[in-house]
């Protein structure tokens, strides 16, 4: 559940910052009459994201009847989720310096066109975060016990992000977002490595990759499955008591170089992610 909370917090804060920048721009420009169109676009983006998540679940549970097909579908979505997580954290690192200015420029252009353009602009600004959240959440909970806990954790992360965004917008509270996105970026890379490991396992289950029973390690006899640290490692990073050689190779091949690239100095002082103004 910690992994899904982190996903909700990270993606939710990115979306909240986008919405806050748009609202702050309209308020300063004395165009509060366009706020309903912004909220309509945001609501449409949320609805589409929820529908996308439901479609993923329906496809896996209903449309695909063969076990191998379900495993292959889960593998594909897991790999896509890893791609989106990686792209997201590097995009935010690169775009932090200019995101506010770009959003304000696009909204100014939309205001010149009309109300529908404002709604569409708000929709497009938020829907990417929503679709990413649905895909990453679906992939992160594969193999977990379906008891509602991961969904509640995701919603809790989103709620926390909304509170943080509101405090930054409405009060003098300031959070070092550069540090926040760096720390959550590192954790999400480890989460993505676990999702990728699970995707490789699904590829082995579906028969696409060999070596399902060629284990790199087996500590199931010494690792207490009921212990809190086991639940933490499994739920957060998909570190399981047993893993095939290919799974371990895939985890290391992704996590090590991506962490090195993400944490390496950029050669210039990284700008803080702009708060809504």
Image: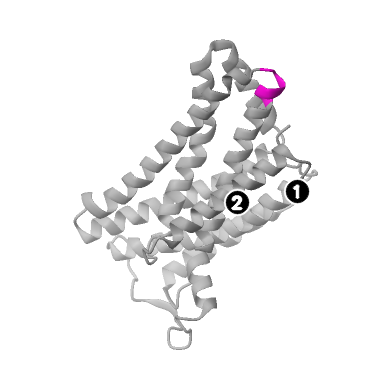
212 over 79 or under it: above or below: below
SS at circle 1: loop
Most distant residue in the bottom direction: 221
Nearer the observer, 259 or 42: 42
Q: CA distance from mark 1 to mark 2?
A: 16 Å
Q: Which residue is mark 2?
A: 160
Most distant residue in the left direction: 65
Rendering quarter of residue 225: bottom left
Mark 1 crowd level (few <14, some 14–19, many ≥20, 10 Å Cα): few
Q: Does the magenta-highlighted stretch encompass residue 269?
A: no
SS at circle 2: helix
- Numbered badge on residue 194: none
* Residue 203 in the figure: left or right of residue 15: left
Mark 2 crowd level (few <14, some 14–19, many ≥20, 10 Å Cα): some
What residue lies at 66% left-to-right and 47% top-to-bottom?
164
Model colouring: one colour
What residue lies at 72% left-to-right and 36% top-to-bottom?
97
Q: Where in the figure is residue 105, as x and y percent of width and height?
A: 65, 21
Q: Does the magenta-highlighted stretch encompass residue 27?
A: yes
- Numbered badge on residue 176: 1
- Magenta-drawn segment: 25-30
Q: On the rendered image, what quadrant is the C terminus found in? A: top right
* Mark sitting earlier along the chain (1/2): 2
146 over 129 or under it: above or below: below
* Residue 240 in the figure: left or right of residue 167: left
What residue lies at 60% left-to-right and 51% top-to-bottom?
160
Q: Where in the figure is residue 249, as x and y percent of width and height?
A: 48, 67
56 over 198 or under it: above or below: above
Q: Where in the figure is residue 232, as x and y percent of width and height?
A: 53, 71
Nearer the observer, 173 or 81: 173
Nearer the observer, 113 or 148: 148
Q: Where in the figure is residue 179, as x and y percent of width and height?
A: 73, 52
């Amino acid at each position: 559940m910690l992994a899904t909370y982190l996903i909700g917090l990270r993606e939710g804060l990115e979306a909240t910052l986008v919405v806050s920048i748009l609202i702050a721009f309209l308020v300063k420009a004395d165009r509060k009459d366009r706020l309903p169109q912004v909220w309509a676009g945001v609501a449409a983006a949320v609805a589409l994201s929820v529908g996308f998540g439901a479609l993923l679940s329906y496809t896996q549970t209903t449309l695909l009847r063969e076990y191998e097909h379900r495993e292959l579908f889960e593998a594909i979505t897991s790999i896509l989720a890893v791609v989106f997580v990686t792209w997201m954290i590097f995009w935010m690192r690169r775009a932090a310096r200019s995101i506010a200015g770009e959003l304000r420029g696009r909204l100014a252009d939309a205001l010149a066109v009309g109300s529908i353009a404002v709604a569409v602009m708000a929709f497009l600004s938020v829907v990417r975060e929503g679709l990413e959240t649905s895909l990453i959440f679906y992939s992160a909970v594969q193999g977990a016990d379906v008891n509602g806990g991961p969904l509640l954790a995701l919603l809790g992360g989103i709620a926390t992000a909304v509170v943080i965004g509101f405090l930054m917008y409405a009060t003098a509270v300031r959070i070092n977002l550069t540090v926040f996105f760096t720390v959550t970026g590192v954790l999400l890379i480890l989460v993505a490595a676990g999702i990728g490991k699970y995707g490789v396992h699904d590829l082995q289950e579906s028969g696409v990759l060999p070596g399902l029973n060629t284990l790199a390690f087996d500590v199931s006899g010494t690792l207490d499955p009921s212990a809190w640290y086991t639940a933490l490692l499994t739920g957060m990073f998909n570190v399981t008591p047993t893993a095939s050689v290919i799974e371990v190779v895939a985890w290391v091949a992704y996590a090590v170089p991506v962490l090195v690239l993400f944490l390496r100095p950029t050669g210039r002082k990284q700008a803080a992610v702009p708060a809504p103004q």
